[in-house]
Image (cartoon, coloured by chain):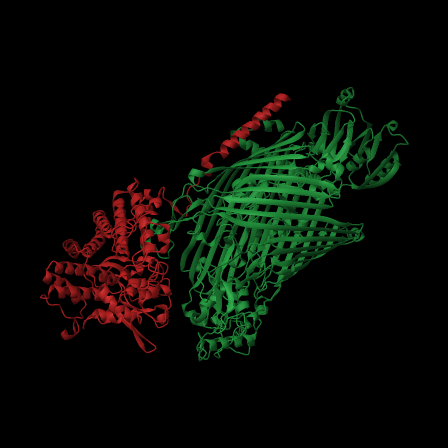
């Protein structure tokens, strides 16, 4: 089979033969493995614990437990041959292997008979014995006795090296007797052994040091010890401690250089993600997401409910459709060394998500059941009815009004239409509910050395704090199969996941209503459950915007996400692997949105046209990445070379139809029942991407490491004249703690590494087809002469090109006292140029501008620190803490003609997120109106924009980070994560600018209690100008106040982001219940926030949006 | 062993080469345009797609609202600038207020037409360029489209030159050149308008065509040779080329396709007087004119804040049925407001509401008045009065008693009186139609005298300055294109 395979290889005409063969092979492996798995599952288990016992006695014991009989020449087993053997629940094969290790005996199992013979030296061994050099053979295994393929075995000081093959065995020729072999494998503690001919099994212990944890990087793996780049890894155990619905939220406060902010508290929230700052002025700043090697979209298409908040340009976040429980690890790649190999897509860094894979071994079943409650954690101190009415009356008096405006459009809160004695806490009524949280996960995994599998399923449901049944429900499945041929040369990995989400959130966020609705506003529902329109004496509606209208609204968003990928690899020779990954992703969403007639006030019902919006969107992509991996010792070090290519297509489709004219509410979900259809929009775009990439890594003595990466990219997003571009990076590391002088003099330094990298990456997160001269249809309901007209979409620039980022990083990694204290310091400076902006044109050209590359330059520099410490390790008690801190700085270095462009917002040398505000000096003592200082420092009541806005500051965080503590006592574990950010934000977004304190604003004019400190009469010392209901009178002052520094303030906070407390039930209970694992736990998210911020939440920074919820859950984790 | 390895290396090398050649292939990353769009590479190669671009111009013409500063809002915004419309006092819309009080500014308002017309000129230019270099079009379609594009370009420049004076004469799509263009002398712009229209006359079909440009239909919604002639007659008139004006309007007046319609039918769809009309492109609406001018009891002056000026109402002679048939009134809070009622069907909530009226751009009545003026200017006063009387007799209610009927003008008027009669007739005939009044005031030189009297009526203490007859250019264009110079006074 194998011969056939190689003979035909590379002949395209017979490609299908190969595919068929691979499929057949896969099937065989699958069936075989399943059989094997079941055999392993039910075979007789042997448990032995014999010290210094005679071999014969042990064999008898095995016979007793297993029922196997023996056949051997009694001469070969002597009476006084004593052995040690400890096995638990082992198969007969494992037991015998354990028993005979180191004995000059071999055994064979035939049926129920075991024959034992004396070991004969092989011909080869006989020959070798005659030389001085010896040939060493052996096997590298993990603590469970499983072979470790790919481990490196080298002769110390000689540079001679081999890698272990299938089953972890190796054979090293021509080694000096008594030479020292160094055996190492990523993630394990390296071991040194003296060379002997028959080395037997060399057991490598898993490294406890964080330095040796596997880090997934682009097209490979590394460890923190050997890495030349800036990579941070978060593992499943951390993710699963957090009751979050998006894996990105589990990274918050844990990764230096990564800033994450949740836009709202709704399920499916938009998320701001910035790796080392904002690089692009107007284009995408989302990182590249890669799931199991397949790039995943960073933006959803149109159609998602905007109330969840935005991720850059579109609402929602695509990673919301990834089940966090399926994730094994998340690796955050920050510098050029780590990301340059992703070329044009990685200017904003990369986040690699690796899903869980099956592990060989007995079948295990894991289940995790979690139930919880989410609430709004903080309320604003709003006026009660008394304070509100006082404000309103005073405002009208100030305005010189002689009466309260009558009629349904008048001052309903004062003119008698509304009951003045009511006083409702709308925060409690509208967002004071409990959002139920349920999360159920189950998985099964197992396998043999050749095949392992994992299958899992999840169910996740979140309720809402608003009244009404607005749930978000997700169901998901995930599987992974790994298979290898018997000789371990051919390998296949296949994994897939499917998630379906049903989100019923309404179109309105009642938070803004809760914050502004007058406390005297009428009750929301009538006795009969319909909306209360609070009719006046003539029967006219006075409560036009009844917030409970949302219960008559149907807003459904069904999204499904399919990700499938497989990797086939073949080891041509021990030094060379060829592999190819194939991936497919499909993100599909269908939406439906309508308002039942109960939503509309009675007067408008005669004119009601029932309408439903139907929408769908789809992002699908496929990818093929063939790769070659070559590694070989060269001189005294080890060289690894990777060459690969990428072919990728992404298609985006979306459309939306407005159907109207339904006869009744009941048929509004049936498009056939509509009398009129109108297309709102349609999107159809294709993105093609090709690349060639390579990496050369040379590691000398595990001390000096050089890593060079390069990529040549081509993308359909760019003009015909600039289709291709090259990117590259170099990273170097010096592990100085391996130097003799360090070891001799600074023994307390257990690890020390200096590293640096420089390279280029690109940003192609711009719209498709910008270089094409396109004509788009003009969507109208009644086309001109029945024909759809087209119009030009814009001017064409065939020279469009990537935005380019040049990144420099330096890092210092130090480990003290046997790595009990680890310090990691990183400095980065990223400069992004060739910014793709709109070149403004006079309209006489037909358009306001054209997309063009500008010599504008943005710099992001920053310091990142991480300090991890094992504070205390005791038999029962363990305490680990870790703190990380990031100090970022964003600066605009250059912007040509920036005075003329929209960039008049920006200032050279300052952050892109600069705010320029008026300076409020206080109140004019006699009029009680706001006063500001103008650009000459004089007082003015009407500051001029672009001239007098002299106060500048940035909304960028000054610094941010997290403090993590893990305390373990016997079976108890407590995890605490404090997250902190220092920043400035808008204090109060309550009043829309048209609603000064005192205005009726259709009933939405309530204010903070703080506003009571207003001017009433000359001589008053106050902070708020006199109340005023008519915007036309003093609205301009109020507007200027809104644009002044007084409306901004410190929004720094420290938040107990996550707390997790768990208890593992005692071993004897587990044994009694036959559970492998049973853990009870309680978890909390956003439990406590310490801040001086005046708004609702310093993270979402918007008091009109639902803030991130405080979620508390309890759960149980069971393993069988 | 060694040989086997070498073979494997060769195979691997082969794979490498294959991959590299695949990845380096330009074809793999080139994409066709999306199916949701057409591309300039092929849009003019096909009759249907080429036509769809020109149809797009008309769609956009019909689409924007009356306050947008699109071409259709000429009827509204210039009406406010002139003496036709009164803006409700409590209305605080800055745009409307600025036009009404003639207080326009380069950062305030007045440049909306500039901003909206130049993008249309870009489309006409790209059609002219695209079609001229295309080989895939059938001859009849090519001619008609080229004619329509040239006609539309002339139509655009006609309003630009009247509203702004000297304007950049943009005749191609090259943004690099156009971004540095300066203003062209009015005379040259007029020459281009006449040239485009004469060419359009040759190219355009005499008959009305459907959207495929292959069938003759009754729908008068695509420009024809008649439309080009109508605008050409107007262009000659504005340039005081009386002879040509008389000739061109005469061509239309002798064309059996066109006849004066009954006073109640003038604005109905496809009536015999219409030379070019635009149908609605949105469900539930007949014309934007009706939506903008008719004051409904429900919306009052909040929804439609303009009504007809005293000056206009006083201009009608006794017995003029235009005052009763084309004007209506409503009493709100005991005050009676008169509003334009040429278009009578307001917007309906019913998406399937039937359409009876089209917004009329060119109609035959104007040709009578053009010829009347041209003849009188050439001292053919009696013939000119005949033309005027054609319009006046249509505005007469034949069923009322002769004493209550609109008087026919005597043929022995002096030239000066006859010209005054023409002006008055134009005011009464074309109020709230396509900026006729504002443009007439300017071209006849009456603008200063009329507005000096009118502006103080609009606002106490208001005064008129002659520069206000031209609207300002947008400050944005002045910054982006240093060769553009603002109109004097702004």
Q: Quadrant of residue A1097?
A: bottom right
* Figure colour of chain B: red
In the displayed structure, A78 sits above or below A1115; it is above
Q: Position of residue A799 (x, y in %)?
A: 42, 41
**Front position in the image: A906 or B440:** A906
**Front position in the image: A942 or A1107:** A942
Q: How many marks?
A: 0
A1112 sits left or right of A8 in the view: right
In the displayed structure, B443 sits above or below A816; it is below
Chain letter, colour green: A
- Point 31% across, 70% down: residue: B459
Residue A1 seen from this side: no
- Point 10% across, 60% down: residue: B379
Q: Position of residue A697 (x, y in %)?
A: 62, 34
Most extreme residue toward the left, as rendered?
B412
**Front position in the image: B306 or B457:** B457
A1045 sits left or right of A794 in the view: right
Q: Position of residue A1089 (x, y in %)?
A: 64, 61
Q: Position of residue B225 (x, y in %)?
A: 21, 51
Residue A642 seen from this side: yes
- Point 20% across, 56% down: residue: B238
Q: Look at the image and tell me in which quarter the N terminus of chain A lies.
A: top right
């Amino acid at each position: 089979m194998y011969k056939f395979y190689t003979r035909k290889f590379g002949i395209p005409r017979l490609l299908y033969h190969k595919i068929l063969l691979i499929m057949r092979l896969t099937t065989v492996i699958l069936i075989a493995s399943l059989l094997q798995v079941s055999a392993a599952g039910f075979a007789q288990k042997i448990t032995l614990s014999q010290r210094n016992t005679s071999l014969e006695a042990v064999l008898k014991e095995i016979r007793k437990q297993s029922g196997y009989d023996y056949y051997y020449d009694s001469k070969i087993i002597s009476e006084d041959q004593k052995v040690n053997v400890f096995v638990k629940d082992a198969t007969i094969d494992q037991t015998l292997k354990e028993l005979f290790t180191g004995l000059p005996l071999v055994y064979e199992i035939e049926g129920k008979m075991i024959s034992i013979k004396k070991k004969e030296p092989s011909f080869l061994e006989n020959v070798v014995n005659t030389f001085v050099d010896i040939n060493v053979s052996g096997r590298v295994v993990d603590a469970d006795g499983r072979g470790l393929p790919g481990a490196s075995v080298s002769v110390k000081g000689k540079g001679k090296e081999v890698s272990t093959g299938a089953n972890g065995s190796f054979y090293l020729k021509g080694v000096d007797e008594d030479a020292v072999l160094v055996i190492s494998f990523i993630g394990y503690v390296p071991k040194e052994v003296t060379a002997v001919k028959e080395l037997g099994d060399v057991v490598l212990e898993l490294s406890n040091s964080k330095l040796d944890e596997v880090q997934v990087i682009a097209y490979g793996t590394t460890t923190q010890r050997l890495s030349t780049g800036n990579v941070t890894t978060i593992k499943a155990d951390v993710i699963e401690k957090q009751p979050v619905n998006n894996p990105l939220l589990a990274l918050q406060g844990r990764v230096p250089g990564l800033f994450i902010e949740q836009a709202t508290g709704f399920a499916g929230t938009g998320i701001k993600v910035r790796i080392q700052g904002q690089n692009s002025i107007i284009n995408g700043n989302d990182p590249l997401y890669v799931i199991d090697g397949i790039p995943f979209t960073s933006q959803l298409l149109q159609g998602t409910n905007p109330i969840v908040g935005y991720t850059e340009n579109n609402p929602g976040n695509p990673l919301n459709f990834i089940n966090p429980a399926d994730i094994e690890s998340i690796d955050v790649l920050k510098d050029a060394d780590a990301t340059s190999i992703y070329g044009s897509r990685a200017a904003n860094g990369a986040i690699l998500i690796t899903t869980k894979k099956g592990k060989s071994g007995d079948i295990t079943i894991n289940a995790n059941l979690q139930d919880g409650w989410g609430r709004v954690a903080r309320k604003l101190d709003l006026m009660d009815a008394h304070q509100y009415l006082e404000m309103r009356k005073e405002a009208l008096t100030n305005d010189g009004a002689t009466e309260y405006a009558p009629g349904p459009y008048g001052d309903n809160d004062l003119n008698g239409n509304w009951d003045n004695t009511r006083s409702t806490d709308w925060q409690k009524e509208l967002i004071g509910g409990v959002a139920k949280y349920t999360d159920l996960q189950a998985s099964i995994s197992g396998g043999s050395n050749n095949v392992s599998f994992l299958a899992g399923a999840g169910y996740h449901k979140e309720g809402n704090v608003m009244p009404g049944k607005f749930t978000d429900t997700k169901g998901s499945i995930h599987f992974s199969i790994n298979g290898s041929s018997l000789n371990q040369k051919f390998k296949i990995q296949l994994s897939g996941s499917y998630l379906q989400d049903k989100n019923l959130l309404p179109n309105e966020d009642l938070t803004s209503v809760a914050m502004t609705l007058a406390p005297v506003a009428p009750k929301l529902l009538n006795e009969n459950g319909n909306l209360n329109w609070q009719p006046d004496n003539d029967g006219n509606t006075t409560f036009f915007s009844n917030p409970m209208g949302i219960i008559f609204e149907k807003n459904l968003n069904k999204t499904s996400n399919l990700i499938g990928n497989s990797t086939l690899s073949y080891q041509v020779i021990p030094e060379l692997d060829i592999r190819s990954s194939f991936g497919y992703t499909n993100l599909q969403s269908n939406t439906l949105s309508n308002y039942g007639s109960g939503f509309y006030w009675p007067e408008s019902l005669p004119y009601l046209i029932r309408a439903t919006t139907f929408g769908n969107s789809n992002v699908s992509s496929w990818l093929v990445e063939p790769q070659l991996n070559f590694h070989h010792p060269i001189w005294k070090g080890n060289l690894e070379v990777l060459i690969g290519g990428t072919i990728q297509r992404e298609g985006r489709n979306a459309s939306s139809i407005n159907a109207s004219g339904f006869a009744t509410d009941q048929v509004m979900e049936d498009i056939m029942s509509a009398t009129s259809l109108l297309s709102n929009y349609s999107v159809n775009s294709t993105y093609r991407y090709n690349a060639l990439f390579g990496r050369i890594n040379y590691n000398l003595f595990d001390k000096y490491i050089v890593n060079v990466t390069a990529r040549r990219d081509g993308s359909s997003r760019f003009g015909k004249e600039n289709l291709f571009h090259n990117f590259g990076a170099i990273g170097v590391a010096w592990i100085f703690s391996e130097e003799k002088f360090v070891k001799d003099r600074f023994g307390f330094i257990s690890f020390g590494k200096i590293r640096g990298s420089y390279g280029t990456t690109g940003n192609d997160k711009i719209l498709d087809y910008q270089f094409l001269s396109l004509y788009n249809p003009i969507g109208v309901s009644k086309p001109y002469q029945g024909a759809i007209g087209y119009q030009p979409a814009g001017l064409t620039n065939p020279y469009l090109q990537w935005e380019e980022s040049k990144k420099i990083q330096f890092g210092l990694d130090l480990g003290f006292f046997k790595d009990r204290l680890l310090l990691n310091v990183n400095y980065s400076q990223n400069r992004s140029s060739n910014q793709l902006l709109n070149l403004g044109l006079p309209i006489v050209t037909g358009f306001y501008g054209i997309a063009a590359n500008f010599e504008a330059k943005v710099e992001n520099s920053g310091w990142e620190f991480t300090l991890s410490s094992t504070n205390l390790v005791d038999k029962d008690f363990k305490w680990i803490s870790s703190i990380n801190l990031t100090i970022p700085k964003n600066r605009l270095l250059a912007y040509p003609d920036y005075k003329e462009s929209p960039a008049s917002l920006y200032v050279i040398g300052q952050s892109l997120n600069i705010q320029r505000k008026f300076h409020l000096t206080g109140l004019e003592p006699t009029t009680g109106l706001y006063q500001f200082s103008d650009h000459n420092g004089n007082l003015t009541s009407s500051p001029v924009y672009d001239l007098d806005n002299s106060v500048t500051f940035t909304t960028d965080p000054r610094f941010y980070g997290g403090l993590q503590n893990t305390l373990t006592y016997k079976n108890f574990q407590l995890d605490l994560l404090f997250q902190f950010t220092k920043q400035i934000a808008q204090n109060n977004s309550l009043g829309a600018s048209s609603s000064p304190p005192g205005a009726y604003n259709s009933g939405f004019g309530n204010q903070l209690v703080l506003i009571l400190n207003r001017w009433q009469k000359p001589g008053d010392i106050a902070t708020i100008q006199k109340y005023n209901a008519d915007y036309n009178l003093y609205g301009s002052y109020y507007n200027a106040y809104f644009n002044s520094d007084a409306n901004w303030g410190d929004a720094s906070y420290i938040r107990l982001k996550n707390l997790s407390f768990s208890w593992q039930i005692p071993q004897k209970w587990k044994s009694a219940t036959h559970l492998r694992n049973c853990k009870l736990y309680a978890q909390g998210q956003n439990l406590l926030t310490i801040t001086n911020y005046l708004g609702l939440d310093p993270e979402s920074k918007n008091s009109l949006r639902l803030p991130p919820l405080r979620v508390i859950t309890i759960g149980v984790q069971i393993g069988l | 062993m060694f040989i086997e390895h070498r073979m494997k290396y060769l195979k691997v090398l082969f794979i490498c080469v294959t991959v590299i050649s695949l990845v380096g292939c330009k074809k793999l990353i080139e994409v066709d345009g999306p199916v949701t769009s057409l591309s300039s590479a092929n849009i003019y190669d096909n009759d249907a797609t080429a036509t769809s671009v020109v149809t797009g111009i008309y769609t956009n013409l019909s689409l924007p609202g009356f306050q947008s500063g699109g071409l259709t809002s000429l009827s509204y915004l210039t009406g406010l600038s002139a003496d036709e419309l009164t803006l409700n006092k409590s209305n605080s819309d800055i745009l409307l207020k600025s036009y009404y009080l003639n207080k326009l500014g380069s950062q305030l308002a007045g440049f909306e037409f500039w901003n909206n017309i130049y993008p249309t000129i870009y489309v006409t230019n790209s059609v002219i360029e695209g079609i001229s270099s295309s080989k895939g079009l059938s001859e009849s379609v090519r001619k008609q489209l080229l004619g329509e594009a040239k006609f539309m370009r002339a139509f655009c420049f006609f309003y630009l030159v009247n509203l702004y004076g000297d304007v950049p004469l943009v005749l191609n799509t090259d943004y690099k050149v156009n971004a540095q263009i300066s203003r062209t002398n009015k005379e040259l712009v007029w020459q281009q308008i006449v040239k485009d229209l004469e060419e359009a006359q040759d190219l355009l079909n005499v008959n009305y065509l459907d959207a495929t440009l292959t069938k003759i239909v009754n729908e008068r919604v695509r420009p024809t040779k008649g439309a080009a002639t109508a605008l050409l007659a107007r262009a000659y008139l504005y340039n005081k080329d009386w002879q040509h004006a008389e000739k061109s309007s005469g061509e239309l007046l002798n064309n059996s396709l066109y006849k004066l319609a009954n006073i109640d039918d003038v604005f109905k769809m496809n009536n015999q007087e219409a030379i070019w009309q635009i149908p609605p492109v949105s469900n539930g609406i007949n014309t934007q004119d009706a939506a903008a001018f008719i004051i409904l009891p429900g919306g009052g002056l909040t929804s439609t804040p303009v009504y007809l000026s005293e000056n206009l109402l006083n201009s009608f002679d006794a017995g003029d049925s235009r005052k009763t048939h084309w004007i209506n009134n409503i009493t709100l809070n005991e005050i009676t407001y008169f509003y334009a009622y040429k278009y009578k069907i307001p917007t309906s909530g019913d998406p399937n509401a039937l359409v009876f009226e089209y917004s009329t751009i060119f109609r035959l009545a104007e040709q009578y008045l053009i010829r009347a003026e041209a003849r009188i200017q050439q001292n053919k006063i009696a013939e000119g009065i005949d033309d005027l009387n054609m319009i006046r007799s249509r505005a007469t209610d034949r069923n009322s008693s002769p004493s209550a009927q609109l008087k026919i003008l005597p043929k022995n008027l002096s030239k000066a009186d006859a010209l005054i009669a023409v002006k008055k007739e134009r005011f009464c005939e074309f109020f709230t139609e396509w900026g006729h009044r504002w443009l007439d005031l300017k071209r006849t030189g009456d603008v200063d005298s009329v507005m000096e009297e009118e502006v103080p009526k609009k606002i106490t203490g208001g005064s008129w300055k002659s520069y206000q007859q031209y609207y300002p250019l947008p400050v944005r264009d002045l910054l982006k294109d240093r060769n553009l110079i603002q109109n004097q006074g702004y």
